[in-house]
Image (cartoon, grey):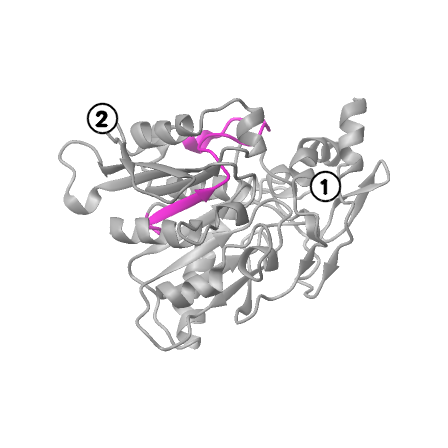
Amino acid sequence: MLAWILALAAVGAGTAESAVDPGDLGACAPTSGGGTCADDQDDHALLALRAARLSANASATVWRQTTPEGFQKWTLESDDCQTRTYYVYVPEGGGKIKGMVLFLHGYTVSIDHTCGGDSANAFSAKAQADQKGFIAVCPEGYYKKDTMTRFGRKQFGPDRVGWNAGGGCCGVAALLKINDVKFVSNVLDRLEDTVLPTMGVAYPRQNVFAFGFSTGGLFAYRLSCELTDRFDGIASVGAQWDYAFGFGGDIHWTKPSLCAGLSVWDGIGTNDKFLVESNMDPGDKWGAYSTDVLHCAGEPKAVPAAKGVECKAYERCGTAGASESELKRSELCVYEGATHEVKAMRTASYGVTDTAWDFLYEAR
């Protein structure tokens, strides 16, 4: 218990600053079972204990929620009576739109630190959107605006934002069983019907991908199972298939019978602390997804990459008799020395965003 208390002392050490006010997200939050969310101190304490280590791995920079440069802020009312926020960027230059990428932040990581600037967990979304010709969308996970403290430290608030990725991960979204899959589906609907036409572009009919970091990477895997018909591929950075960062709950959507899967690009660093502490080989979980879900056969082949990066891939995955359009691809890139962050894998010659886009785009 003492160790947990010490871990909790490190949570929320930064100061939360917010430039937006999405509304009181704690006022009305029905669970997926239809009930309302009581302010249960024991459940909050349990969640705080389970989330402490993930929070401790968040960037040490001051958390702030601002609209990334060039992005437009949009909101929608979700089915569980919440005002949810997402940000959209249409590439400059008026060229042909080749697709769209949803960037999914990690637990406690802000939108600005995911889609804007040069933070440790930024995907260089705007620059890559301009270069590759895709629309960038940055949806925001769930949080409770009200702050709750325990052991003198903050446990809930805007800077404890996260996704209900499964297996108890992560944050208040998992505790309250928020239907984040439906939220993403609603965002896609709104983009198609209203937002993108308003911004002067049409909704892409192909090359719609989800890129996620850390718990956002796990959530991207969930979308590959539960929104297979809305996406064409995913990229997971600093996450593993069927691994809820030590939370230990059952990840029901990983069962092959429930998951058709999508083409995947998976990137992880050899010094990623979750990989090291769980004593996993970076290829094990990726291999399981490739063979059990995507039905990749044989051995993956080595792929030429940059210095310090080792990649291997399955090129044609699918069940017997699958048509050419039904075949999928799967690639794993391991970055020597990289830690649990995006920036360490954003090398000039083999950065995660452009490499993942190129791989998935070619898969189409």
Spot occupied by residue 182 in the image (x, y as percentages of width and height)? 47, 49
Calculate the distance from the C-alpha at mark 2 to the C-alpha at mark 1.
51 Å
Asked if the magenta segment contains residue 250, the reply would be: yes
Q: Residue at x 55, y 24 (%)?
A: 278
Q: Residue at x 15, y 31 (%)?
A: 320
Q: Residue furthest front?
A: 307
- Asked whether 153 or 173 is in front, the reply is 153
Q: Pointer 2: residues within 10 angstroms few (<14), some, or many (20+)?
A: few
- Quarter of the rendering containing residue 313: top left
- Quarter of the rendering containing residue 3: top right
Q: Pointer 1: residues within 10 angstroms few (<14), some, or many (20+)?
A: few
**For the residue marked with disc 2, what is the amino acid?**
Gly
Give the extent of the magenta segment.
229-254
Using residue 60 as the reference point, say whether residue 343 is left or right of it: left
**For the residue marked with disc 1, what is the amino acid?**
Ala
Spot occupied by residue 255 in the image (x, y as percentages of width and height)? 39, 28
Question: How would you classify the magenta stretch by its main secondary structure?
Answer: loop
Q: Which residue is mark 2?
A: 298
| Residue 310 in the image: above or below residue 105 | above
- Quarter of the rendering containing residue 260: top left
- Counting the numbered discs, the total is 2
> Is residue 26 among the parts visible in the rendering?
no
| Residue 289 in the image: above or below residue 349 | above
Spot occupied by residue 219 in the image (x, y as percentages of width and height)? 49, 42
Q: Secondary structure at mark 1?
A: loop
Spot occupied by residue 283 in the image (x, y as percentages of width and height)? 40, 28
Using residue 17 as the reference point, say whether residue 302 is left or right of it: left
Circle on res. 38 = 1
Q: Quadrant of the N terminus?
A: top right
